[in-house]
Image: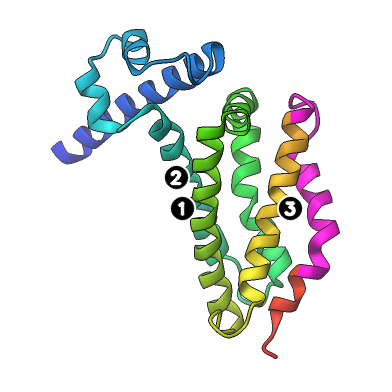
Amino acid sequence: MDTTIAERKRRLVRDELTEAAVRLLADRGFDETTVDQIVTAVGMSRRTFSRYFESKEDVIVHMLAGAGAHLCAELRGRPTAEPPAEALRHALSVFTAMCAADPAKTLLVSKLILGTPALLARFLERQSVWQDDLTAILAERTGLEPDTDLRPTLAAGVALTAFNAALRRWVAGDGAADLDELVDQAFAAVAPALEPAAGAS
């Protein structure tokens, strides 16, 4: 019970720091915002911040890591007979569901990432990890060997590229469009390139 309460407290503190960081980074800009400003906004110490994050970049990276874990879990849980394009599209609903749950925050975070070179680099670095993980899951689902068959890697990469294109369009339109519909449009365009991963050569 004590462990559960302690973990709940840690989660609350982390969430409070994250909310403050996102708000300040969006209002003041990434380069102009300091860790001291973030902790001051929530009445905590810099030492407390350091227990949860190594830097202000890590606040955003932590959010991305959680989203990536959910993405992979969703793909792994899809029916084995489901075609790769359909399974990947359902898995990416993890991200569109986050947007639907809190579109204002999602838009702020997305603008921060896409508009800040340091964060964009971390985002792309994290997506590279996601692609490797998705490739491994697709290989298991299809019986293909990613070391000798390019199709699982290509399918994972194309799916993430399609999502990125939809996300950029959504951010450029200041969130006016429906992100889920934009992802549907992107997948409709790339579905033929995803399907070859469905069977062994």
Q: Pick the quarter of the image with the C terminus.
A: bottom right
- 181, 18: nearer the viewer: 18
* Residue 182 counted in the magenta span: yes
Way the structure is coloured: rainbow
Q: Where is residue 174 in the image (x, y as percent from the top left)?
A: 75, 24
**Residue at position x 49%, y 59% from top?**
73
Quadrant containing the N terminus is: top left
Q: Distance between the Cα atoms at labels 1 and 3?
A: 19 Å
Q: Which mark is residue 66?
A: 2
In-image side of 160 versus 34 (left or right): right
Q: From what the image shows, is residue 137 above or below residue 45?
A: below
Residue hosting label 1: 69
Question: Measuring 21% from the left and 33% from the top, which residue is drawn there?
Answer: 5
Q: Name the residue under label 3.
A: 162
Q: What residue type is labelled 3?
A: Ala
Q: Where does the image place residue 146, in percent across and percent down from the top left? A: 56, 79
Residue range of the region highlighted in magenta in the rendering? 172-193
Q: Of 66 and 124, which appears nearest the observer? A: 124
